Image (tube, rainbow, N blue to C red):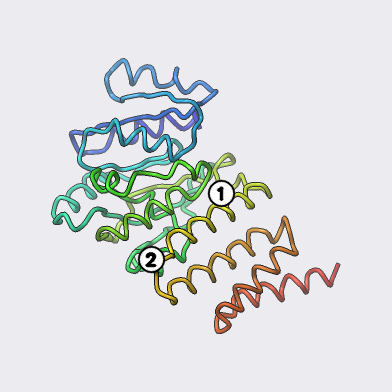
Amino acid sequence: MASFLHDAIDNILQQDYRPLEIIVVDDGSTDNTASILQPYIANNQIRYIYQPNLGQASARNAGVKLATGDAILFVDADDLLPEKAVSTLVHALEGLDDSYCLVHGEMEVFDDLTGEVLEVSKFKEISKTFKRLISERTNLFHACLIRKKAIEGVGMFSESLRFSYEDYEFILKLFKTCKFLSLDQVVYRYRIHNASDSRVYNKERAYLNMRQHRSILKRILKNESLLTKIAAWKKHYFWTGMDFSQYDRKLSQEHLLISWLICPWDIAPLRFLIGGLLKRDRR
């Protein structure tokens, strides 16, 4: 990720909102991250902390503890912000009472090589209800400005979720405690490149994601309605069924079948299940 650091920091420094505190948490990098950051440190443009590789949740918690501002926007080292993104989010949050802890916008996904915008993720409908939020695999977290006291109030990020879903669980915990405001404006630019999580995926990662997502649902859904539980587990088995289609065909088929049996009027899992069976029969 070090190759993107200049772009990320310069991009944030160009934001029109002040005062702006930039905290860079180095989670055990083994590349030239520290040397890249030296000019920014020397010019007092960033605060830098190094820690052993403890995972994203730990790194984000470390940054929150250092932050002196009232609100925090998390930016990954390979991503960017559109012009005026920070000021747009801050002014929106400042206009709200304390029952609101989070303002989010939309997220633009772009290809690093071509610069082409691949999609614009809109989260307005997803963030309206807990049932919808827990049922989707969403990157809403990236496009958020969050009150620091709200982050602390839900116990920060779960460091037991070292490799994935720590942001998903965090957003769910927040939603249970306060209101979200949605803006119809792109406030985050998510970069797709050869080393990004969306492209670096394998069987072991798929199994890990499945286990971690399942453990989150078991904790979060305990006191939820039956309809919310049905929606969440249906999507869990659908997404894991899709994830394993290229790694474990038997497990993929089992999960797609379970997803359909949970909610038989939704034929999407059945369609993919039949499609997979037909492909197998042609071989």
Mark 2 → mark 1, Cα distance in angstroms: 21 Å
Give the residue at x 45% y 48%. Answer: 166
Q: Earlier in the sequence, mark 2 or mark 1?
A: 2
The outermost residue toward the top is: 42
Residue 277 horizontal/vertical position (percent): 76, 72
Residue 61 horizontal/vertical position (percent): 37, 37
26 vs 102, left or right, is: right
Closer mark to the observer between disc 2 and disc 1: 2
241 vs 72, left or right, is: right
175 vs 273, left or right, is: left
Give the label on residue 126, or none. 2
Q: Is residue 156 above or below residue 140?
A: above
* Residue type, label 2: Ile
Give the residue at x 48% y 43%. Answer: 160
Residue 206 horizontal/vertical position (percent): 63, 52
10 Å neighbourhood of mark 2: few (<14), some, or many (≥20)?
Answer: some
Image quadrant of residue 234?
A: bottom right
Q: Is residue 40 above or below residue 199?
A: above
Do the residues bearing badges 2 and 1 touch, measured as CB atoms within 8 Å? no
Residue 273 horizontal/vertical position (percent): 69, 73
Q: From the image, which quarter does the C terminus lie in?
A: bottom right
Name the residue nearer the viewer: 57 or 136.
Answer: 57
Name the residue nearer the viewer: 115 or 56.
Answer: 56
Q: Residue tagged by mark 1?
A: 198
Name the residue nearer the viewer: 135 or 32.
Answer: 135
The outermost residue toward the right is: 283
